[in-house]
Image: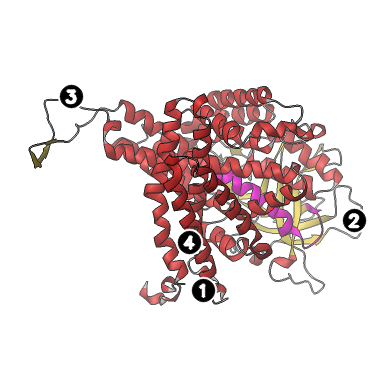
Amino acid sequence: MTLRSTLDFLLYDWINAQSLNQRPRFADHSLETFAAVFNTCERIAREKFAPFNRLVDMEEPHFDGEKVILPQATHDATRAYAESGMLSAAQDYDMGGMQLPYTVEAAANAFFAMASVSIGSGMLTTGNANLLMVHGSALQKEVFAKNEFSGRFSGTMCLSEPQAGSSLSDVTTRAVPDGADFESEPLGARYRLKGNKMWISSGEHELTENIIHLVLAKIPGPDGKLIAGTRGISLFIVPKKIVDAKGELTGVRNDVALAGLNHKLGWRGTTNTLLNFGEGKYPVDGEAGAVGYLVGKPHEGLRCMFHMMNEARIGVGMAATMLGMAGYHASLDYAKTRVQGRLVVGNKNDASVVGKDASTPQVRIIEHADVRRMLLAQKSYCEGALALELYCARLVDEQHTAGGQAADDARMLLEVLTPIAKSWPSEWCLEANSLAIQVLGGYGYTRDFPVEQYWRDNRLNMIHEGTHGIQAADLLGRKVLMEGGRGMKLLADRLQASIHKAWRHAELISHAQALTAALLQIDKATTAAWATGNPQDALANAVPYMQAFGHTVLAWIWLDVACASMAQDATHSGASNAGIMGATAYFYTYELPKINAWLSVVESRSLLCANLPEEAF
């Protein structure tokens, strides 16, 4: 199946995205408008992104002493993406948006991620603006968010610091009030920031008129000291260039300076920076300190920022998924045309005689069983991950437009599934990229083919927006316990509903039984992990727990997709149905059994890794 046909099936035959048009917010839309959006995005991705994926990998961003230089292709792709309206696709009409369902926006962005994730699109800019739409003042929305949605400005998120990494409790960037009358500033309470931020994607470039940094910093207490932990963190808008209350550039550069470009394994087309705030290189009004405007209330910055972080985590999951998909399609095309070797034949009269007949023609490598195994693994990982990301996107629409209990249930399910939506594709679609290289053999690790770049690009996603360890601790340490385990109960109910549907189809009964057993194992392991009430006991094996949890979720996703395929088989090709059933069978045969090993260490609360003496390493 092509990406377009896969998306159409998942959107319309599986999660019923067309029913969203019955809600007032989306009433102007139809399948025709959705198709028009996909046609536009598919065309731009094909013309402006895909042809330059290798170029931006080879011509990394560089600093000429005054500005960061990027290839012209990046400028052209960025402009085309903004002009398509995708930066504001899900926004209100009065913000320049199309009021598209987020489900459709996420699906449309899949074309760009598959064409060239390295060029990038607008994930951080949109996430930045979306945060301001929830937590910003009316003028902050008008001046900053609206200009980001139009593509005039771009956005970043500035959390990590060189000495703190992911430990946000230890950030030391300071923000102090800028004068006695700062509260009269129309753009918000005005502060001066000083500190350093690391790993800032798109932190410096010339692609847009301005860059809007969202920066976490601490406001000193009455004693002049920073408040320990995350309680002291506030959130600030820090533009690269100072603007007035109408959003016009004033000609004044803010005191934000590029301290260095990080040279990465992958995503080389996107700048990744170390930024210095308030070092005095660009003093504003003759004074050192980056001008920043408070977002929301003091000391509530982390709560605000998590709005963007959670959205970014789903975006990273989609990026990982589509990099895996790109590798899968490339290796599938190669396997269909590459001729090499012959099939093993045996002697029916003597089972010990096995060999190859050199007089017969060589076969395409897709005819070899092991190559088919690797292709089917990729298909099950990538198409399953795509289904997961679209399911989560549908939950976003439910949360925002369903109303009542359905909206709150969607919120709770998203809480539980977000760590999986980020972590599972970033691990297993990376494995798909590794298998794509393996399918190509020696050619796979050369630059003659794109699969080595896909792997390099995707390796970053296990770290982007929170490492595996962070996601696992969030899942087992917080999400499965929230609100008395309500999210787990809701998820279990969804799994049970799919199991019930599967029992109607003889081909799926064994899978339904396996998923039932897996769900019981997850429940048992969750209880066992917390049996002592000691977080150190529970979280010592949080990553194996998350791997098993993720595999169980993906087994459920495949079972539910298979049910939809069986129901709609009359309107789809036999090949399409065979592919879905084959991928489902592969996942249940080869993948789901892996949870036994992962959960065994969780249930026993093994402290092998935690307690091994340091000198033993």
Percent across and percent down for residue 198 are 60, 54
The alpha-carbon separation of the residues under discs 4 and 1 comes to 18 Å
The alpha-carbon separation of the residues under discs 3 and 2 comes to 81 Å
Mark 1 surroundings within 10 Å by alpha-carbon count, few (fewer than 14), some (14 through 19), many (20 or more):
many
The alpha-carbon separation of the residues under discs 4 and 3 comes to 49 Å
Q: Is residue 80 visible?
A: yes
| Secondary structure category for the residue under label 2 | helix
Q: Earlier in the sequence, mark 4 or mark 3?
A: 3
The alpha-carbon separation of the residues under discs 1 and 2 comes to 48 Å
Can you identify the residue that label 4 sits on?
A: 521
Can you identify the residue that label 2 sits on?
A: 183
Going by the numbered disc 1, the residue's amino acid type is Asp
Going by the numbered disc 2, the residue's amino acid type is Glu
The alpha-carbon separation of the residues under discs 4 and 2 comes to 55 Å
Q: Which residues are magenta?
A: 292-317
Residue in view at x 46 percent, y 25 percent: 573
Residue in view at x 40 percent, y 50 percent: 591
Left or right: residue 168 compared with residue 378: right
- Asked if residue 578 is positioned above or below residue 468 in the image, the reply reads above
| Secondary structure category for the residue under label 3 | loop
Tell us which disc is closer to us: 1 or 2.
Answer: 1
Residue in view at x 45 percent, y 73 percent: 610
Mark 3 surroundings within 10 Å by alpha-carbon count, few (fewer than 14), some (14 through 19), many (20 or more):
few
